[in-house]
Amino acid sequence: MQKLAVGIDIGGTTVSYGVVSENGDIKLRESFPTKNYQDISEFIVYLSERINHATAGLDSKHTLTGVGIGAPNGNYYKGTIENAPNLSWKGIVPITDLLSQKINLPVYLTNDANAAAVGEMTYGGAKNMKNFITITLGTGLGSGFVANGKLILGHDGFAGEFGHTTVFHDGRECGCGKRGCLETYVSATGLKRTVVKLLSKAKMDSVLRDYSYNEITSEQIYKAAMNGDQLAMDAFEFTGRILGMKLADAVTILSPEAIFLAGGMANAGKLIFEPTKKYMEEFNFPIYKNKVKLLSSSLPENDAAILGAAALVWESEK
Amino acid sequence: MQKLAVGIDIGGTTVSYGVVSENGDIKLRESFPTKNYQDISEFIVYLSERINHATAGLDSKHTLTGVGIGAPNGNYYKGTIENAPNLSWKGIVPITDLLSQKINLPVYLTNDANAAAVGEMTYGGAKNMKNFITITLGTGLGSGFVANGKLILGHDGFAGEFGHTTVFHDGRECGCGKRGCLETYVSATGLKRTVVKLLSKAKMDSVLRDYSYNEITSEQIYKAAMNGDQLAMDAFEFTGRILGMKLADAVTILSPEAIFLAGGMANAGKLIFEPTKKYMEEFNFPIYKNKVKLLSSSLPENDAAILGAAALVWESEK
């Protein structure tokens, strides 16, 4: 008998899901636009139909054990998505209750970055690690922390919002209402804000001087840096400096074996890894120096969210 | 049969130890100057004699289960005190091996602030908590972090050095060799450095203008603030602002139920608690606002270190 889990990744744009085996094979994968279902009841009806359809054809050697969901502002303890700014379902949505009533299976939920950490621990580079951190660099900065072999969920189930630590107390405006949050510096958006700041501050030539704020993308900055554009390279250096400094702070709390960088910006390779590592070591308390590995996530980028969500099911059985 | 543990607190000045019951009664308490034993072998011989003497008279209703030690730079996994700047034993001292060979009992070790967290969880205000932080404010700033009901020791056993997170990247020189560490602002020494900076920056009168840097103590600053000295009050406000801001960072990782302040400076009461709470809430990511309690340690100050060290024994049995 092979156990299977459904992993669901709910993003602002797309809902992706897959049927995943205990060893990480994705047997089926589908996705649809999140905005198709502005009403949560309709979303649940559609999703449960898809899950039933996907698993209806299972032979007697397979059994579906449960469903895991990664979603913004997902609360593990309560099974609720709470006031997620990028989803159209407002207020507090009891998504695990709604879904498990329809499909008669246990449903687990956490935020997407915590799910990525569980995925890394179950299927990725953190398989044999008890203490590590994952940082996902996308539009924002997500994070998941594992200590003593367990995901840190905190007293209220919302732990792991490292993107909202304060870098500069009077710094950049953040979508959360605060100023100077880490993700306003270290994320695709943060990188672009840094480029635009450098365009105002420095006089050097840059191909990026011909584009408006709205036109500039992190991919463009990456290409410019790879072509030797000094201003773009400086923007990556600054981004890595801020990330390295704040990771050194996190190291004092957790003393992790490794820190995994995932998400689109991690694909910039040594442009982001080198300054991050350099400044993390510079700011590390001496006792931690040269002990903490800075690694790429070993999960395929397109599968990471589904694998992480599915891994919640196995993690909950421990 | 009542189980007992010996709790030993090794400080730069004094070694204190006590025989402690599972419910936290200290049946015997002794101390001696740390500097009496510059040689670790002589220290171990003396300490084991004292332990044997203290427990020789136990009746058949009592049994000694083990020994716990809190010491600077104490490593739980290896049982070693490593390069502690304030102790005369240099290099890496395998103290748990040395002591357990003499007394034939298990010996556990961690740093003093981690021991304080275990003490709070076993005997103090964190008895029913699974996620909390302790901050000890003395000459420096010590910290212990508990998540999912377990002390975070990290990959190498040295987790919990929050005093060495970076507040200002080009800030005050720290004894650790870095600049801008939290404990250079938030500690008895940090408070004094803030006072002396304010003496240079502000023009207002203050009773503290008549004392040299070396003369000023945190007790004196406390008294001045209680007597309405504005400069002394501003120094506490600044200290609480920095602590509150950095605690808000730690909250994003752990989402704790409570943060306990312990140590001498916590006795300054609302002078330190009020600004710390105010600024922690100001810097908190919205999802955590008004959820995290800021509490005094409920362990008697003189007993906390012994109770915490003894509690390591019960914690290790879990």
Image (spheres, coloured by chain):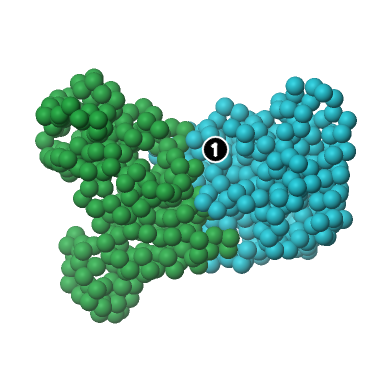
Chain colours: A green, B cyan
Asked whether A40 or A112 is in front, the reply is A112
Q: Is residue B231 left or right of residue A111?
A: right
Name the residue at 21% across, 70% down: A223
Quadrant of the image occupied by residue B199? bottom right
Q: Is residue B214 left or right of residue B277?
A: right
- What residue did someone put label 1 on? B150
Asked whether B48 or A277 is in front, the reply is B48
The image quadrant where one finds the C terminus of chain B is top right
Q: Position of residue B230 (x, y in %)?
A: 67, 50
Q: Is residue A73 left or right of residue A11?
A: right
**Residue placed farthest to the bottom in the image?**
A204
Mark 1, residues whose alpha carbon is within 10 Å: few (<14), some, or many (≥20)?
A: some
Q: Amino acid at mark 1?
A: Lys
The image quadrant where one finds the N terminus of chain B is top right
Q: How many marks?
A: 1
Q: Position of residue A256 (x, y in %)?
A: 48, 52
Asked whether A29 or A280 is in front, the reply is A29
Is residue A7 something that shows in the picture? no
Helix, strand or loop status at disc 1: strand
Image height check: is A224 above or below A72? Answer: below
Name the residue at 87% across, 34% down: B56
Asked whether B316 or A312 is in front, the reply is B316
Is residue A237 something that shows in the picture? yes
Quadrant of the image occupied by residue B214? bottom right
Q: Position of residue B257 (x, y in %)?
A: 51, 33
- Chain of the residue under label 1: B
Q: Position of residue A123 (x, y in %)?
A: 31, 46
Image height check: is A252 above or below B259? Answer: below
Name the residue at 83% across, 60% down: B38
